[in-house]
Image: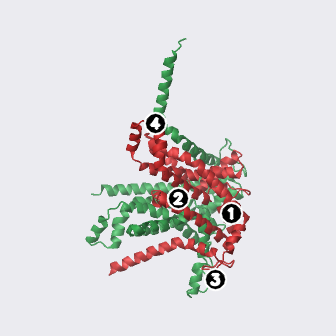
Chain colours: A red, B green
Amino acid sequence: MIEAIQKRAFWAWSAFLYVFIVTPLICVILASFNQDSVQTVPPLQWSVRWYEEALRNQNFVRGALTSLLVATIATVVATPIGVLGAFGLWKSKSRYKAALDAFFALPIVVPGLVTGISILIVLTAADVAVGNVKLICGHVLIVLPYVIRTTLASLAQFNPSLWEAAETLGASPPQVLWKIVLPIVRPGIVAGMVFGFILSFDDVNISLFLVDARTITLPISIMSYLQFSFDPSVAAISTILIGVTFVGTLLLERLFGLKRLFEGG
Amino acid sequence: MTAYPAQAMGSERQRTAGRISRAFGASAILTMPACIVIAAGIVLPLAYMLILSVQTPDPGEATLSTDFTATSYLKFFSSPFYWNVLLKTIWVSSVTTAVCAFLGLTLAVSIWLTPPRWRGLCVLAVISPLLVSIVTRAFGWMVVLGDYGLINNVLIHLGIIATPIHMMFTNFAIVIGLVHVFLPLMTLPILTSLDRVDRNIPEAASSLGAGALTIGVKILLPMVSPGLVSGITMVFSLSMSSYILPALMGGADSGMMTTLIYQQFVVTFNWQFGAALVAVLLATSLSAVALLIFETTRRTRKWMVRP
């Protein structure tokens, strides 16, 4: 009897936790279809006028284009560097292998705020003042560790006898990497790219210190909009963001499995 | 003058090349670009910033000179105002971590007990806050916690309260926002530890008469402690250095270290003092994490040698 009550209480508690997790996201989506300019959830009257409003907002549109450009270039630059790094770490027999592994995780371990500030200081001292360049420098560091991690995780499952078989048949190590290993770990690489892209597109912590008046990313333009007004156009643009992220997430789950991406830290 | 025959020189060169490649290997060449990027993007800037923190404060100046001074650190440690900011940051991060640990433990156990068919969906739901931009999440909480938000609307509608409870722009809102985003980072490592637990063990305990609570606290908890420690480490250090949520949900002067740091870099341009603040923040969270890991290792060793 007590056992049954305990069990029920436990599942009710778990259900409450899921509600806690998804409520704010669902409220954003609901609020975006509001007719009024005052935030009420659920809306009294429904409309899509705030979507038109958001898409007419030049700051949001320009921000989205900047974010898209920066995230794309950062991903394109970071991916080959990360994949080579992961291959190198995987093949390494050095006794510093564990240290190198930890070194590669530094961009994740060092808080974004600290990374952003220290890059700002160095770029200012070096007189780099082009907004896009500053942002890309910071965002390469967002994408890189995730490409390395997912590639390494895929490599860990690579069957070493395939390598031996290829070498026995006369392939050189670069040929084996390019023709055998690369196609097999490709899902891991793509997962790292997708996740890195999402993080770069959504980033505020690092970008905050690297944007300037002319170059501003979408999350930061939303943030500065939020500081002086609170109408549903923010909900609308956020809902679009959630939609884009959701597609990316589904892709990740298919390619790689979400749990693998996050576990272990 | 002894001239080496050309052939001997060639083989000498080959041998040297062979030695170099054996010492560093092809893997060193492959990891080189990533090492350079991380060294140039993280290590050097961090070192530069630490040196800047012991320079004479000079608004708008970011170049280094050779005379070092502890002015910024003295300014920080001699003022009760800054001490309070640091203590408040530690307090908010500790509360966030404790709440996350409790919620994360129960959530991980609940996912562990969920049939495999539903597991993917549960994990997706748990991770979802991490995949949504921080501004979207903060906005979502404004809609939920605001004076005319979801919770107040429901409570007034049900007749439980007459006037809205003020929840937004308080420490409570900061903790809620932080717990929400860091919960997956606590839950998933614990779940990974749980997955290594043999399911026969809790069953054995149950058939020996242990209740659900006893099984949870006395059997599962010690077994998931590696995951728990890794979760606590991550959540605490990320809470200490989170800026956006306190700034958006705690109001303009939320009095956290990070808001202070932001002001130094973007408003007053006292970068030397700002760099010192960053150093203090990093030192605090690193020592807290080191203490935690040291303490758990000591305890684990005690468990191991127990007869």
Q: Mark 2 = which residue?
A: B237
State the separation of the CA atoms marked 1 and 3: 28 Å
Chain of residue at mark 1:
A
- Please give the residue where the numbered disc 1 appears in the rendered image: A221
- What residue is disc 3 on? A44
The residue located at (51%, 70%) in the rendering is A21
| Residue at horizontal 42 percent and vertical 49 percent from the top | A156
- Kind of residue at badge 1: Ser
Asked whether A84 or A119 is in front, the reply is A84
Q: Going by the image, does A251 lie left or right of B69? A: left
Q: Position of residue B13 (x, y in %)?
A: 51, 24
Q: Are marks 4 and 1 in contact (CB under 8 Å)?
A: no
Q: Are marks 1 and 2 in contact (CB under 8 Å)?
A: no
Residue A100: mark: none
- With B268 as the anchor, is A192 left or right in this view? left
- Local SS, label 1: helix
The residue that mark 4 highlights is: A172
Comes first in the chain, label 4 or label 1: 4
Q: Eyeballing the image, is A236 above or below B243?
A: below
Does dot 2 land on a helix, a strand or a loop? helix
User: Can you say whether A236 is above or below B147 in the image?
Assistant: above
